[in-house]
Amino acid sequence: MQTLKARLSAQGYLQHPSRGGSGNPGYYAAATADAITRFQADFSLTQDGRAGRATIQALNRQPADLLATLRANLERLRWPFNQPVDRGLVVDIASAEATLYDKGKAVWHNRVQVGKPGRETPELRSLITHFTLYPAWNIPKSIFVNDMLPRIMSDPGYLQRRNIRVLDHSGNELPPEPAYWPSPASMRLQQQPGPSNPLGSIAIRFSNPFEVYLHDTPAGELFSSPERFYSNGCVRVEDVESLAGTLFGLHSWRTEKPFDERFANSETRNVRLPRSVPILMTYRTAINSEESAMRFRSDRYRRDRYLISLLDRQEPAR
């Protein structure tokens, strides 16, 4: 207990450490719990006022480690694509949050789910041009081969239960039985719109070489998780329909709404924005915030250490 209070005091979160406590080893006096909560906010942890394992690990980070994190993020800010967005959508991958800005002010903010380690959400800058209502999911080859194919081979009803069509690259439908399939390289899977489709009711589109986009999800319960790294690389958005409507609202001269009666028939349809909206998807493990001098996030993709190793390389002799 005293070590915990001393560490909180040394980092400026607890002004007058005391020996008081509730008797329960999981909880502490009000001042200590408040200090822990403020520390957890600055390190993007669940703000429960308890010194659990993740909180203790963050408290034990050494100054040299924190300085290296700052150095890595200062380097990221130098990259051209990471320049600030005055009007547009910023997807903060490390915190799994997204914010839409208009003239520098946040007009929409919500939680997202991003790529799990090994299937990371990429960093990029692009323009949102349109979204697809009730989209079909063209299943990426990697997911088809690595995740679905073993299940299909062991479960004859897998494709039918999930409303998945088997197509060749010309769009012709193939038999659902694997025995009649050509090689996986010459075919693709497409899941039709419906309750089991992982894209939900809407996908927000922007040009990029990674084949990623923002979309709805039936896995809404995962948004309450403190670290939302669940997807295969795309970005799942909480209340994505409100984001789509706000994107339209950035252009007050256009009154068309994306979700009026014309789109109530659940048919797949592309809807273009009146004007393209910039999108920045960025990975930052340390940021300035209005509430505190600095906030840190966990480096789930382990990119900081690699970036620091590149910065530490000496230039070859010329």
Image (spheres, rainbow, N blue to C red):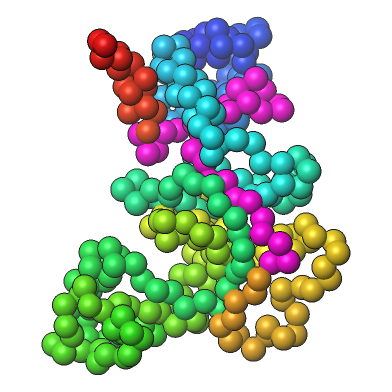
Question: Looking at the image, which is closer to me, 274 or 119?
Answer: 274
Query: Is residue 301 rendered magenta in the image?
Result: yes
In the visual, does 245 lie left or right of 268?
right
Q: Which residues are magenta?
A: 273-302
In the visual, does 317 lie left or right of 15?
left
Query: Is residue 119 rendered magenta in the image?
Result: no
Q: Where residue 213 sits: x, y (%)?
A: 50, 60
- Can residue 222 be seen in the rendering of this structure? no
- Can residue 83 be seen in the rendering of this structure? yes
For the C terminus, the quadrant is: top left
Question: Looking at the image, which is closer to me, 69 or 167?
Answer: 167
In the visual, does 255 lie left or right of 141?
right
Q: Where residue 79 sits: x, y (%)?
A: 50, 32
Q: Where residue 195 sits: x, y (%)?
A: 50, 79
| Extreme residue in the front direction | 318
* 164 vs 202: above or below: below
Question: Looking at the image, which is closer to me, 127 or 239?
Answer: 127
Please name the residue shown 76% across and 47% down the image: 102
Please name the residue shown 55% across and 52% down the image: 126
Please name the residue shown 65% across and 7% down the image: 16
